[in-house]
Image (cartoon, helix red, strand yellow):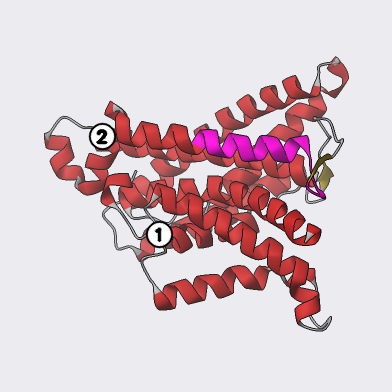
Amino acid sequence: MEILFQQIINGLVLGSMYALVALGYTMVYGIINLINFAHGEVLMAGALVSWTVVTALAGAGLPGWLLMIIALVCAIVVCTLLNFTIEKIAYRPLRNAPRLAPLITAMGMSLLLQTLAMIIWKPNPKPFPQLLPTDPIQIGGAVITVTQVLILVSTVVILGGLLFLVNHTKMGRAMRATAENPRVAALMGVKPDAVISLTFIIGAALAAVAGLMWAANYGTVQHSMGFMPGLKAFTAAVLGGIGNLAGAMVGGVLLGLIEAIGAGYLGDLTGGVLGSHYADIFAFIALILVLTLRPSGLLGERVADRA
């Protein structure tokens, strides 16, 4: 029972990070029906920028929590500028093109960002310093770290703030109007280009937070680290219902739980044939089942929540 509880905690932490990235996917899709496959690389950029800031200030004698805040602010600034530039240069000129064109562009942008990161930061993995206390917290026989608690709390607060922004603010109304019909929204005084750019900026900020969390939780960063989390987050967005903010959160947490619990029991279930390193198969099995049985996702797509 303790093993199951531990895997549930691990799954919630992993799912929270998936959910933050999935929110970026679902917001962009809700606005312009585009899957931004370069979004995982924005997470990677946030993690590498955070590592750069933390290592540069390592000898300054600052407390770990302050280093984390400074690194997060720098990562958010860089990631938002990066995503804003991607949208303006790579996606905006193709907004009225056939859907295949921006999709291919997104995949090409993903490879470009990986290559640039490899050139700037070199291909070797880099250890990410422990910034918060590492003493484990005992909960019912399972353990959780301060970093993991911060991940869980931050994800809940961010989701609540995002839902408030979309559903209860003037900017949120502009987002929903643009998602419904950009041309009509423009006639009503909304600036669709500005709304779309803001959506990319918000998604980039979420990816930057997820990148720092990923680096702090797993203790390593490298240029290719964004590919698999980005793919899993896309799976989570589809699982919950692409275009649905709450669906992205539910899909991310559910996917994290499926992976963690599957990794904990996969060896026993298969008689040792498959180990925990095969846990990725559960994510894609879940995706296949959802696309087969409920193509709109578990919660479906609700226009009122699209951003």
Amino acid identity at mark 1: Gly
Horizontal and vertical percent position of residue 149 = 70, 37
* Left or right: where 9 falls relative to 285: right
* Left or right: where 24 falls relative to 50: left
SS category of the residue bearing label 1: loop
The dot on residue 241 is 1
| Position of the C terminus by quadrant | top left
Residue at 45% in and 57% down: 105
Residue 202, compared with residue 287, is above or below; it is above
Magenta-colored span: 140-158
* Foreground of the two, 94 or 189: 189
Residue at 70% in and 64% down: 261
Report the number of numbered marks: 2
Say whether residue 115 is visible. Answer: no
Residue at 63% in and 71% down: 282
In the rendered image, which residue does mark 2 sit on? 174
Label 2, label 1: how far apart the Cα atoms are:
22 Å
Q: Quadrant of residue 134?
A: top right
Residue at 63% in and 64% down: 258
